Amino acid sequence: MNHLSGMDASFLHLETPEMPMHVGSLQIADLPEGYARDYYEDVKRWMASRMHLASVFQRKLALMPFDLANPVWVDDEDVDLDYHVRHVILPRPGTMEQLEKYVARLHSSLLDRSRPLWEIYVIEGLNTGQVAIYNKMHHAAIDGQAGVAITKALLSGTAVPAPIKPPRPRQRTNQYQLGVAELAGAALSNAVTQYIKLFKSLPAVGRALRSVVYPVSDVDGKRRLVMPAGLQRAPRTPLNVAITNQRAFAARSLPLAEVKAMARRSGASLNDVVMATCAGALKRYLADYECVPDKPLVAGVPVSLREAGNTDPNNQVSMMMVSLATTTEDPIERLKAISASANVGKKLQGSLKGAMPSDFPSLGVPWLMTGLVSLYGRSRLANRLPPVVNVAISNVPGPQFPLYFAGAKLASFFPVSIPGHGIALNMTVQSYNGSLEVGLTACRRAMPDVADLADYVVEEHNKLRDLIAALPVAEPAAVVAAPEPAAKKRAPAKTVIATVKKTPSRRRVATKVAAAPIASKRSRKSATAAARTA
């Protein structure tokens, strides 16, 4: 058996029927020319031959008695591929909009905890002649970067990959689940280990906290704590409500080369450009509902805690808060403000990294956490309490070469993620083969028109690209060397040491560009906003 860490298990305990905690992806694939076989059967054979490359496909949960401690992973000796790999045919005409709605419906249902926590759907009937593959996997088993590693294990870089060595035969125990006594003993043993690790980490946690939260003396001699810079309160919006289990999904693609060029020319990072694009789109979307917060929106941005090269299939992630500067009208100035806020957040995360354990004692935690989360969602406290962040925005780096799945070439690779109570929208982007694939996953009741926001993302990208392209390019500074003074003699006061030619800064805006006027795409959005947040 393999114990779940405290962070991995928290995704199980946070799960409710309204808030499934699985992540997924939607791939659009091109079948080989002249393909005449049954692709669904090919996918099942493909999975059977490769799923031993990642343990997550052949393990399931063993729950502790009375949920007194975190469950453990055990091997599943009877993986039913007919259950885990399913076949769907879209009704005519098979549009992308139909596919997005069907994926949203599939993403709404919980995974069966008595089986390995993953499912794959082969979806045919697209009017383009392509085939779609939707898959989902529980977040307790995987985070974004580990997901990319598992994807590489299941996908290949060529249409006809090299043969995979079959797995070694394993001895069957013919035991469906572990005994109560065995589970209880494992829970107690693991709890002791967790407490020892916690006590050993306390000095590092204390040092990390002292580096960001420290006491200072006022002018009257009173002591007070100084909190970290960059933490700010998020405004309330229609996105910050309790959610249902129904999902809405929209997918769009952006040229990765354009985003990289925008980052280089503006001096910001690629993540900053992505957040600036999302900020502009959110600003327009909320304006459609006559929601213009007087404070900037705040994004919760996942931050990986992994060391370089670590691909363990577990969660090693934290979150930082970044201001989206939505009260700033000029998109270029907004990008600068987002970049500055992200830098503060990264510095804070670096200081707190030692205070973020991924494992912690779990005795009594499962039933307590599950009860509190259920109470929080069903009492609709998220509709009344001040939000911590307004939206989740994530950027996952992916492979920059074409991948193949069961012989079909993947043309697109869209992420499908997790909204939550108080954060009804998750905006995740993943780079793949020269594209930045944008996946917007939302609560359908809070955002039935998430496709409008997806269109705004594309439009804001184009607008920001054109504004950054119009920025003046700084010329190299001309430096004139001064003659060296005579030995042991001070140079005269008027001697010119160096002359530097002043040029405009690369990031300076010559003229202020007004934001494009916002036009509502739906006449009754204002009326429905109040009903949705009531």
Image (spheres, rainbow, N blue to C red):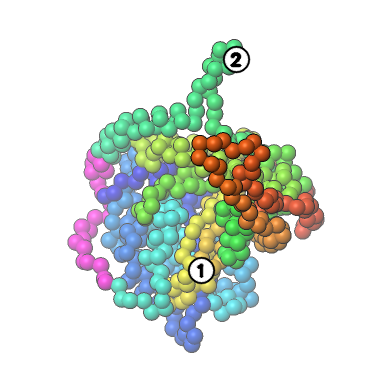
Q: Confirm or deny contact between disc 1 and disc 2 (CB under 8 A).
A: no
Label 1 vs 2, first from the N-terminus:
2
- What residue lies at 67% left-to-right and 44% top-to-bottom? 325
Residue 500 in sight from this viewpoint: yes
Q: Position of residue 17 (x, y in %)?
A: 51, 48
In the image, what residue type sits under mark 2?
Val
Residue 384, position as x, y percentages in the image: 64, 35
Query: Of residues 20 and 471, which is closer to you in this image?
Result: 471
Residue at 64%, 36% (x, y): give it. Answer: 493
Q: Is residue 169 magenta?
A: yes
Q: Nearer the viewer, residue 124 or 259?
A: 259
Q: How many marks?
A: 2
Tell me, yes or no, whether the highlighted magenta stretch contains residue 42: no
Classify 146 as above or below 93: above
Q: Which residue position holds label 1? A: 433
**Residues shaded magenta:** 165-186
Disc 1 crowd, CA 10 A, few/some/many (<14, 14-19, 20+)? some
Give the camera-side residue of 496 and 532.
496
Q: Can residue 123 be seen at all in this image of the molecule?
A: no
Q: Main secondary structure of the magenta part?
A: loop
In the image, what residue occupies the spot 45% across and 48% down? 304
Mark 2 residue crowding within 10 angstroms, few (<14) / some (14–19) / many (20+)? few
| The image quarter in which residue 385 lies | top right
Residue lying furthest left: 171
Q: x and y percent of residue 180 in the render?
A: 26, 43
Residue on which disc 2 sits: 219
**Which image quadrant: the C terminus?**
top right
- Seen in the picture, residue 451 relative to 39 is either above or below; the reply is above
Q: Which mark is residue 510?
A: none
